[in-house]
């Protein structure tokens, strides 16, 4: 991945730059991981990356410098996060419509803090799809 400075402020332009960084990172990650999934040790199951993963994460994580940094640790989060809760899908949210439930998972990242990863569970197939990654606390 080419080195890009991640802007720290919350200007509209900086949020756009971080969104681009996240989308580029996912594109490169998908090229290096053709199966587009990673085994999660706690769930003993695979968590998949789909288009909704990129859309939701780039929109939400780009709003924060630390959340953007966290996304760049995708492999560690996908494999090491632990389930802390299961929530119902949000009514009227078209991106959550294909899921029967949303799992809330957490992972502690050094120098960043606690990271929340939301994972959708598809209705019929029970496939687990990474939905969004954001920080929930910082050091």
Image: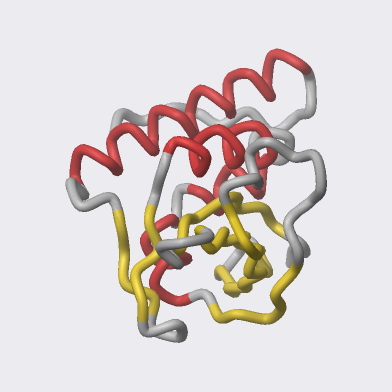
Q: Is residue 133 left or right of residue 85?
A: left
In the image, residue 118 lies at what x, y percent? 62, 60
Relative vertical location of residue 82 with respect to residue 93 in this rendering, above or below: below
Report the residue at 60% width, 64% height from top.
111
Q: Nearer the viewer, residue 120 or 32?
A: 120
Q: Quadrant of residue 109?
A: bottom right
In the image, residue 133 lies at what x, y percent? 60, 53
Q: Nearer the viewer, residue 105 or 69?
A: 105
Q: Nearer the viewer, residue 37 or 93?
A: 93
Report the residue at 38% width, 56% height from top.
48
Relative vertical location of residue 13 with respect to residue 72 in this rendering, above or below: above
Relative vertical location of residue 77 with respect to residue 31 in this rendering, above or below: below
Q: Quadrant of the N terminus?
A: top left
Report the residue at 63% width, 73% height from top.
106
In the image, residue 24 lies at what x, y percent? 39, 28
In the image, residue 28 lies at what x, y percent? 28, 35
């Amino acid at each position: 991945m080419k080195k890009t400075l991640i802007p720290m402020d919350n200007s509209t332009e900086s949020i756009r730059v971080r969104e681009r960084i996240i989308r580029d990172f996912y594109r490169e990650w998908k090229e290096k991981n053709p199966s587009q999934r990673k085994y999660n040790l706690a769930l003993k199951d695979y968590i998949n990356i789909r288009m909704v993963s990129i859309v939701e994460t780039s929109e939400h994580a780009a709003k924060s410098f630390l959340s953007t940094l966290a996304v760049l640790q995708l492999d560690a989060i996908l494999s090491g996060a632990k389930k802390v809760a299961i929530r119902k899908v949000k009514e009227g949210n078209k991106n959550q419509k294909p899921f029967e439930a949303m799992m809330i998972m957490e992972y502690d990242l050094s120098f960043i803090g606690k990271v929340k990863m939301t994972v959708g569970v598809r209705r019929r197939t029970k496939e687990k799809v990474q939905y969004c990654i954001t920080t929930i606390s910082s050091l």
